[in-house]
Amino acid sequence: MQITTVVFLFLAALVSLVFAWFQYFFKKKRNSTNLLLGSLRFLMVFALLVLLINPKFVKNSFYIEKADLIIAIDNSTSINSFNAGPIVESSLNNIIENKSILERFNVFAYSFGEKLNEIDSLTFKEPVTNIAKALSTLNEVSDQNDRALILLTDGNQTLGSDYEFQNLKNQLNIYPIVLGDTTAYEDIRIGQINYNNYAFLGNKYPIEMNISYEGKKAIQTKAKILVNNQEVYRNTVSFNATNNNITLRTLIDAKKVGVKNLRVQIESLENEKNTANNFKNVVVEVIDEKTNIAIISSIKHPDIGVLKKAIEANEQRAVTIVEPKISEIDLDDTDLFILYQPNRNFQSVYDFIKRKGGSIFTITGPKTDWRFLNNVQNNFSKEIFNQNEDIVPSKNEAFGLFDLGSISFDDYPPLKSTLGEITLAKTYEAISFQKIKGVVLNQPLFLVINDDKAKEAILFGEGLWKWRVQSYRANSNFDAFDNFIGKLMFYLSDSKQKSRLELDYERIYDGIASTVLKAKYFDETYYFDSGASLELKLSKSNSSENFERPLLLKSGEYEADLNDLEAGVYSFVVTVNEENISKEGRFTILDFDLESQFSSSNVDKLKRLAQSNNGQTFYPEETDKLIETLLTKAQFTPTQKSTKNVVSLIDFRWLLAIIAITLAAEWFIRKYNGLL
């Protein structure tokens, strides 16, 4: 307690004493009643003054703050292929069991493959390695200025952005332990293959392959492409120490409908150690159908380009951007109409759609002519106000017309629209509701009308381009947004009657991403049925193997995990037990192991990573040296810190109680004794 507070308390007691003396003892007889009343008055005045002074005292508490030591272990199959598993476990135990390390650091251990996980057990079975994502996640684990990260890896990344140029905002000192074979071998490999999943019958589809060479000699070899084991392309390529990378491009005829297995390969070098990276298999499906979609708009807006990119991510769809004054002959082949912010120029377009029929996707916004739109169609209308508003999407979890995919609308930016109540004349299902200033309204933002004659989707807001940007920001790709738009286009362009059993699966699984088949089952009223029993039957082509497994309910849909299946072509049937409902399909799992593409560790890259992040590179046999380095670094020395807590000496509630009690007692005693 400060000396000034003590002085104030002393003066308060003195003032209270003088006040009580003057009230009850100055020029008055001294008796027991006056003594009691004077004491009560003293207590009341003193409590009041103490309440005003509010005396405090400071409490200091001390603690030792240790630096964080984070251990991140590469849990991918490449570590197992180097037979480095026992080495990793030995190095890990040496670090976490060292008493000096435990006294100096707070130790945290993680493993990583595609993503970072808390360490449970090391299996070395992760199919991919994403070092950049692991570093990015670990950078957010702690807000300490100085942290040490021990990175046990071979340095070969098979997924994600380049970890060498990772922007680590906080001070993260990285100490890689290089695993695997550090000897450089002569090697030639097939790198990235760019191709389209779908091709159209009678067209040519492009294949682009990247081939790289590691070595010092001048070599020459042959690159080939085989379609269903028949050679369709051959080219001779040459490399040397400086000219060590080449990209080849070719076009292949789509002659027959069906799934085509393509094998891109390069002839191996003499005495080449790793030949697993000399070939890659991809699958292209040749189809004989295409959906023509027209985006009709009289204004230029980023939404239009974003829609075109998202829709044409599926090669089965072709998008044409036209103005509303287009001739009816040019619209005749259109299967789906996207009307962007209609105005009076759209009259001929609406007349054509009424005569021909067809599904519509209407997008409105601040530039929409609502007087025209309310009169030209009868499905919906909106009050006309001239005030714009930002509207945030709120996902309708009960939506069941089709699978929305992985899009969540969480943290999605608002769309720009005009205020006004929306009236729907037909039955609809909302994909998302409007949320304005944090309040979710009973008004749809994005909805689908399933009419007997045609289907229609309506979005009451402009700014879809922001949603696609947010999809990339959240997932480092556009897949969530593009897949959602793709599913919407499929639903709108599909003229078939709605099925009670909907399947969601990829025609081609590359053996890297998770292999999952999803399904949704609806009852007779087309509401999602969470109590159904679905069964999956699989059969592998050119094999007598058959598999049966149930689809389990998970996150509002049924799901079967197929990650344990070997590479091959599979036919399947999904059946709803106790119902005469089933659907069949076919998919391919590619035989490709990304982690086997490297024959040695990437030592140079790990050294550059360590140098740019105040660290140093070590090898497994140098674990003791690494421990010594960590123990001698001054920046990791534990520091004693203190916290200062300022606490009131007396609770104000007690002081108020004393004031109330003394005043009441004084008043009662004075009244009892007939005093004024």
Image (cartoon, helix red, strand yellow):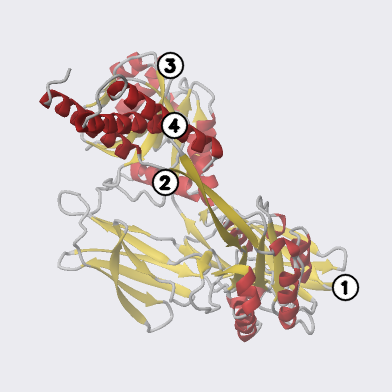
At x 39% / y 38%, what residue is drawn? 335
Q: Which residue is mark 1?
A: 216
Badge 1: few (under 14), some or many (20 or more) residues near its Cα, within 10 Å? few
Q: Amino acid at mark 1?
A: Lys
Please tell me which residue lies in front, 313 or 232: 313
Kind of element beneath mark 4: helix
485 sits to left or right of 383:
right
Of discs 4 and 2, which sits in the foreground?
4
The mark nearer the N terminus, 1 or 3, is 1
Q: Amino acid at mark 3?
A: Asn
The mark nearer the N terminus, 2 or 1, is 1
The mark nearer the N terminus, 4 or 3, is 4
Cα–Cα gap, marks 2 and 1: 48 Å
Cα–Cα gap, marks 3 and 2: 30 Å
| x and y, in percent, of residue 201 in the image | 51, 54
Cα–Cα gap, marks 4 and 3: 76 Å
Q: Amino acid at mark 4?
A: Ile
Location of the C terminus by quadrant is top left
Kind of element beneath mark 3: helix
Cα–Cα gap, marks 1 and 3: 67 Å
Q: Which residue is mark 4?
A: 53
> How many labels were placed on the picture?
4
Rendered image quadrant of residue 624? bottom right
Q: Which residue is mark 2?
A: 484
Q: Which residue is mark 3?
A: 345
577 sits to left or right of 422:
left
